[in-house]
Image (cartoon, grey):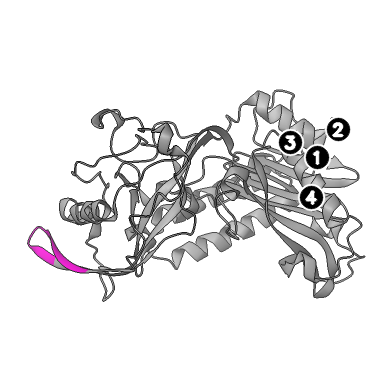
Amino acid sequence: MGRKKVFALVLAAGMLLTAGCSKKAEDIPEAKPEVNEEVLSDFHDSMEQCRGEEEWNETFSISSGEEEKDIEISADITLPETGDFPVIEGCVPEFNEKFKEKLVRSLLGDAALYLADDAHMIKEDLKERVVELERRVEYYSTLQGFGEESKTEKKKLEKCREYLKSAGDKYTVTADDFKEDHYMGERDGVWYRLDIQGAGDYNYLMNGSQGEIRFEIVDLKDAAPQASSGSGNVSISTELQAENVENSCRYSIEEAREMVSGFLKETGFSDLGIQKENSIQWYQDELLGTCGYRFVISPVKVQEILEEDGENPNPGGEILVSDAGIISAILRNPFSVEKISEHIKLLSLNQIKEGIRMEFKNHPDSYFHEDDGNDSHKYSELKLVYAAVRNKKQMEKISFLPVWELSHKQWLNDNIYINAIDGSVIFWEDIMNNS
């Protein structure tokens, strides 16, 4: 899909915010929110002008070369109940040596550390790695539009096969410079793995991810609620609501919550908090028992605005607690708040609609495809969402802001995203929640 640009429409914005938007900052006249202190106390609903409109039905033509097609919009208009969307700006920390050392020592202590990247893997583990990569290569070969991902996995597979030729039977002890991204260590008699910044081949990160921390027990059997004599691998299910089942975990859910809060504080991410809770069920050939909890993590300030049970939020993640304590913590784009701007005025719905029309007409090549089907130019929902958007110029910067999303009936990357504050078009891959 071609590069999207901001629609050429003069819009009166209440505030300049260009994080993640395709229009260059220097092209937008600097604007500041006009705050009238006398009416500020009466500010209750920035979307009042949009309420009452339930549908947008319209058809218009776009042209690309000699080809012409109709864009069909038959969209329900969806608004959240909340009436005010503050802009929350923050960043993902720099994963430098100082940060990694603090993280490693807080999670794995002062015991011996071992390098855990592909190049230093022992023979037994590397064989499993090769099998996993072979499975990925085969999977991507069955999908259309994933050519680059397929090439990446093939390159990883070739490297791992080379590493396997000279792999040893013991892991390598790491130096003390903390330049690496992948570590293993023993804590309370259990082996854990720590991957920093998502650079590990174990992870497949979509475009929206700038950084990721994965702290996980190496073998789930070491944390299973009872002696595992089955032949299959141990697995976990988190579908049960925590308050509705009998949980045999040695920790109460209150103690587990405190453990999670302590983990976030110790690792420097106190702006993240618990959004959702589930109980863990363990399986190995059959049900082993219900023991432990899963906590979905997201920015606390965002939770105060939205009441959503988001799965795998981005920024955010999940933390698992069992009898062995924290056995898994995955943080995607771990977010720290830097600035909050409140009482932001939004553009009118008519301005948003006109901007969407002009986006189609000014950049038609982005919406023509070789594999066009019956639904290729049909849009079914216009929704205002509170989205995490990354900044293209400063990749570590992320902003939560109100965004209009026009949803394509079939393809995610044909959705159109419009900044509800300044009217700029945002690339779909820059919406962090899409990653």
The residue sitting at 77% across, 36% down in the picture is: 114
Q: Amino acid at mark 4?
A: Arg
What secondary structure do most residues of the magenta stretch adopt? strand
Closer to viewer: mark 4 or mark 1:
4
Q: Nearer the viewer, residue 312 or 199?
A: 312
Residue 308 located left or right of residue 353: right
Counting residues from the N terminus, which is met first, the one under dot 2 or under dot 3? Answer: 2
* Disc 3/disc 1 C-alpha distance (Å): 21 Å
Determine the image quadrant of residue 292.
bottom right
Along the line of sight, the residue nearer the viewer: 49 or 89: 49
Left/right placement of residue 161 relative to residue 265 reads: left
Q: Give left or right: position of 130 versus 49.
A: right
Q: CA distance from mark 4 to mark 3?
A: 12 Å
Q: Residues within 10 Å of mark 2 (few under 14, many from 20)?
A: few
Q: Is residue 435 visible?
A: no
Marks 4 & 3, CB-CB < 8 Å contact:
no
Look at mark 1 in the image and give the residue it sits on. Answer: 185
Q: Which residue is mark 2?
A: 111
Where disc 4 sits, the SS reads: helix
Residue that badge 3 annotates: 265
- The quadrant of the rendering that contains the N terminus is bottom left
Q: Secondary structure at mark 1?
A: strand
Please determine whether, in this image, residue 9 is positioned above or below residue 435.
Answer: above
* 2 and 3 marks in contact (CB < 8 Å): no
